[in-house]
Image (cartoon, helix red, strand yellow):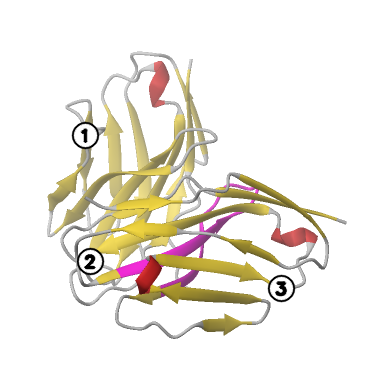
Amino acid sequence: AQKVTQAQTEISVVEKEDVTLDCVYETRDTTYYLFWYKQPPSGELVFLIRRNSFDEQNEISGRYSWNFQKSTSSFNFTITASQVVDSAVYFCALYTGANSKLTFGKGITLSVRP
Amino acid sequence: EPEVTQTPSHQVTQMGQEVILRCVPISNHLYFYWYRQILGQKVEFLVSFYNNEISEKSEIFDDQFSVERPDGSNFTLKIRSTKLEDSAMYFCASSEANGGLVNEQFFGPGTRLTVL
């Protein structure tokens, strides 16, 4: 069975602080994909990144970076120099080839204070 | 940029009524999905649909639910007799491919269903 754990529920930081959102996943499949989605207060789900299980390279996109470590089954997300607009709920999700659904974690509510 | 659209954005209904939530997936996508998010909770998979039939469904997707692709563009979720606990945000998603060739699932903006 697939499982995604986001142990942090709420994080509050002051603007310009760096913040890391943790994600731990479980799957027996050797081929899988990991995703991060952002859900701002308006409610839509915004795709941030996809990473497949064969690509452990870390990725940086502007202020966002992702650290994928298969050894610890983790796919953590770091926001550098956070901004108020980063305030949202962030979901980590897992997809395996064995089925066609995304399994989401419970989400982390990030509040960035001015 | 192509996007998934959903209508209505907010639906209010009385318990026991039927509702139909509508989605227009991205035009060249082949796989369609419905997810549900009860307020303050995680996003949960309901059903996936490919080639005019259900590929997979979760335990949430009981006999009260059905999906249909009535024409070449729309993808609908019907709840036959709504219950209070059906109140949630319903997201439609579509993707180009499945299995080993995975692209991200593009999500629509959601329909907030309120059952009174």
**Viewed as shown, does residue A74 lie left or right of B51?**
right
Q: How far apart are labels 3 and 1 at the CA level? A: 39 Å
Q: What's the chain of the residue with tag 3?
A: A
Residue type at tag 2: Leu
Q: Which residues are magenta?
A: A33-50
Q: Which residue is painted at 62% across and 69% down in the image?
A: A78
Residue A88 position within the rendered picture, expressed as x and y whole percent measured from the top left:
65, 52
Residue A77 position within the rendered picture, expressed as x and y whole percent measured from the top left:
56, 67
Specify the farthest residue to the front.
A71
Report if residue A106 lies within the magenta region: no
Q: Are marks 2 and 3 on the same chain?
A: no
Q: Which residue is painted at 22% across and 51% down in the image?
A: B48
Nearer mark to the viewer, of 1 and 2: 1
Above or below, A58 against A89 in this view is below
Residue A28 position within the rendered picture, expressed as x and y whole percent measured from the top left:
20, 61
Q: How far apart are labels 2 and 3 at the CA level? A: 37 Å
Numbered label tally: 3
Please name the residue that numbered disc 2 is placed on. Answer: B30
Q: How far apart are labels 1 and 2 at the CA level? A: 23 Å
Q: Are marks 3 and 1 on the same chain?
A: no
Q: Which residue is painted at 68% across and 77% down in the image?
A: A63
Q: Secondary structure at mark 1?
A: loop
The disc placed on residue A80 is 3
Please name the residue that numbered disc 1 is placed on. Answer: B59
